[in-house]
Amino acid sequence: MTLTLRIDRARWETHQQSLLDETPGLVPVAKGNGYGFGLRLLAQQATRLGVDTIAVGIAQEVAEVRAGGFAGDVVVLNPWRPFDAAATALLGEAGVIATVSRAEDLRALAAAHPGTRVIVELETSMHRHGLAPADLTAADLDGIDLVGWAVHLPATGSATEARALASTARAVRQAPVWFSHLGLDDYRALRAELGDEARMRVGTRLWL
């Protein structure tokens, strides 16, 4: 049996606009099957919203959001590894930002692909991947273009943890901090402290 889900598009788009208005610095996340809508449609919606950046899960998804018409920056959330040929092929492509979660990968990029635009992912209490700011020195960031620090929190994100990681990372080098899984009130409070140096990556809350 085939199941067809119909969406009230006007209400769906009104919700997206409302969340954008409440979340300055919002970065839509479009990955996998596009939360059931498809990556191309989400890319079209991101363009309609007028955001400057979208995030995808893996390198292979960049082509899909480009095919959907999104012309801004695209962040690849899956951390770059030297053996990932698809991700490496995108390093020189305009508008693509790599995520890096290991100091040795930063050094490898600086040596082989200087000037690569990079977001450095910090280790959080999720312990998924990422590095501790204490494991970095400013010299590790030489040779790459540091776009920001990523703080990907557990689903019930802690503003205390987010603030501590942001402060420690920015002591190594000043750069924007890209948060995931923060409550809107906590995010707005942190953005008030960091100014425009804060971004918020949102997937489920935006599309569903």
Image (tube, grey):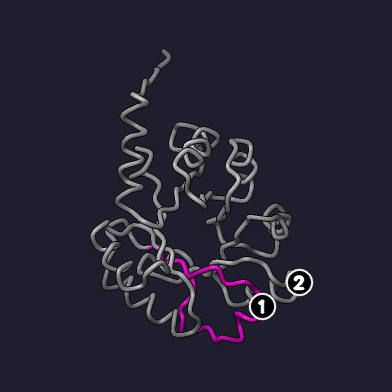
Nearer-the-camera pick, 188 or 137: 188
Looking at the picture, how far across and down is residue 164, in whole percent? Answer: 33, 78
Mark 1: which secondary structure?
A: helix
| Rendered view: 129 above or below 202 | below
The range drawn in magenta is: 130-152
Give the left or right position of residue 109, taking residue 198 as reference.
right
Give the left or right position of residue 161, taking residue 51 as reference.
left
Nearer-the-camera pick, 152 or 187: 187
Residue occupying image coordinates x 56% and y 86% = 138
Upstream in the sequence, badge 1 or badge 2?
1
Residue occupying image coordinates x 56% and y 63% = 99
Residue occupying image coordinates x 51% and y 49% = 54
Give the left or right position of residue 168, taking residue 187 as reference.
right
In space, the residues marked 1 and 2 are separated at their CA atoms by 9 Å
Q: Quadrant of the C terminus?
A: top left
Looking at the picture, how far across and down is residue 22, in whole percent? Answer: 29, 51
Tell me how many marks there are: 2
Q: Quadrant of the N terminus?
A: top left
**Which residue type does callout 2 highlight?**
Ala
Q: Residues within 10 Å of mark 2 (few under 14, many from 20)?
A: few
Q: Which quarter of the picture shows residue 96?
A: bottom right
Looking at the picture, how far across and down is residue 94, in whole percent? Answer: 68, 55
Give the left or right position of residue 137, taking residue 115 as reference.
left
Mark 2: which secondary structure?
A: helix
Residue occupying image coordinates x 67% and y 67% = 116
Which residue corresponds to mark 1? 107
User: Residue 112: which disc?
Assistant: 2
